Image: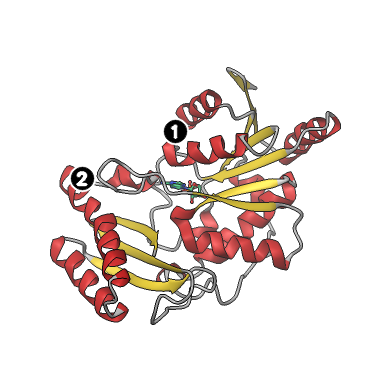
């Protein structure tokens, strides 16, 4: 089935057939995995991939394995028609939209764990989350065997976990990343921003503002633990319900750092009403 110029593929057999045909024609293949409810951040990944490979395929799958009990799996926004239209207009060649039963058929028993990198930060706040991410991403990479796959820096820990699993499993796909796309007031685009009330939406902008200020303070030589503690307190006073972490970490190991001698990143996850938001900046 097609919508405008985009092929809509719903099962692995058709996915592999399409890709085999492209390969026979000598094309390189890029994959852009998503959970749908697409926005300009997702589309920036598609656009970047169009500069890297001949054919670009996006995937849309709301992966139940990466949601914990009581999280937003049931209310996660879905808009398949609008997503396909946006992908088509952006220039993607195909979209893979498998159903859950075909991804996780009866008896599915395999789990991919990337130890260490998955343990802290979002991994600590959302037990099992990165196993779910690692398992679905491994499946998608094996199903499509793309030359390149792209993931956003918005989910910085996810990106590190995926780079690790690609190396560890010798998967023949190059992993690249895309910069964070933001609203004018600095809020990182996210499908979950749709949950925010008008009041929360105003407060949400403080997340990136606080990160930015933390970067400036760190570069001015202030103690990183003090910046983390004061930034956390500031967000709580501003109306965030809980801050899962506000941490300066090594950009490769994701271990908390005491100084800026290595490549450093500052990462935050915080709850605003019923919405959990994450963001990060390079230091
Ligand atoms: P999701 O649909 O939330 O699973 O995201 C799919 C991909 O888009 C992931 O690689 C995300 O890191 C990436 N992404 C999400 N939001 C943004 C953003 N604001 N800017 C750039 N990439 C993003």
Q: CA distance from mark 1 to mark 2?
A: 20 Å
**Horizontally, is 273 left or right of 194 in the view?**
left
Quadrant housing the N terminus: top right
Q: Residue at x 31, y 65 (%)?
A: 215
Query: Quadrant location of residue 126?
Result: bottom left
Quadrant housing the C terminus: bottom left
Q: Residue at x 53, y 41 (%)?
A: 45
Percent position (x, y) of residue 157? Answer: 49, 64
Q: Which residue is mark 1?
A: 79
Q: Nearer the viewer, residue 4 or 249?
A: 249
Mark 1 Cα-neighbour bin, 10 Å: few <14, some 14–19, many ≥20: few
Percent position (x, y) of residue 83? Answer: 48, 31
Q: Which residue is mark 2?
A: 197
Instruction: Give the SS element for disc 2.
Output: loop
Specify the label residue 51 is tagged with: none
- In the figure, 105 relative to 167: above or below? above
Does any portion of residue 138 appear in the rendered image? Answer: yes
- In the figure, 253 relative to 50: above or below? below
């Amino acid at each position: 089935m097609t919508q405008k110029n985009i092929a809509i593929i719903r099962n692995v057999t058709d996915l592999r057939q399409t890709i085999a045909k492209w390969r026979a024609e000598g094309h390189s293949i890029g994959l852009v995995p998503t959970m749908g409810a697409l926005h300009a951040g997702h589309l920036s990944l598609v656009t970047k991939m169009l500069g890297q490979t001949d054919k670009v395929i996006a995937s849309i799958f709301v992966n139940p394995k990466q949601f914990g009990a009581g999280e937003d799996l049931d209310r996660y926004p879905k808009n398949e028609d609008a997503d396909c239209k946006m992908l088509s207009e952006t220039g993607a060649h195909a979209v893979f939209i498998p159903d859950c039963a075909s991804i996780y058929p009866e008896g599915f028993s395999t789990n991919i764990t990337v130890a260490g990198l998955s343990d802290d930060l979002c991994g600590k706040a959302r037990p099992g989350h990165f196993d779910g991410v690692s398992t679905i991403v491994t499946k998608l990479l094996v199903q499509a065997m793309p030359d390149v796959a792209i993931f956003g820096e918005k989910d910085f820990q996810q990106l590190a976990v995926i780079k690790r699993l690609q190396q560890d499993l010798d998967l023949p796909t190059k992993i690249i990343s895309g910069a964070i796309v933001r609203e004018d007031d600095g809020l990182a685009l996210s499908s979950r921003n749709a949950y925010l009330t008008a009041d929360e939406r105003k407060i949400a902008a403080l997340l990136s503002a606080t990160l930015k200020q933390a970067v400036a303070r760190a570069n001015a030589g202030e103690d990183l633990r003090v910046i983390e503690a004061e930034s956390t307190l500031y967000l709580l006073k501003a109306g965030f319900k809980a801050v899962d972490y506000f941490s300066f970490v090594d950009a490769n190991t994701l271990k908390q750092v005491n100084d800026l001698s290595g490549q450093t990143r500052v990462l935050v996850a915080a709850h605003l009403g019923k919405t959990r938001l994450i963001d990060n900046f390079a230091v």
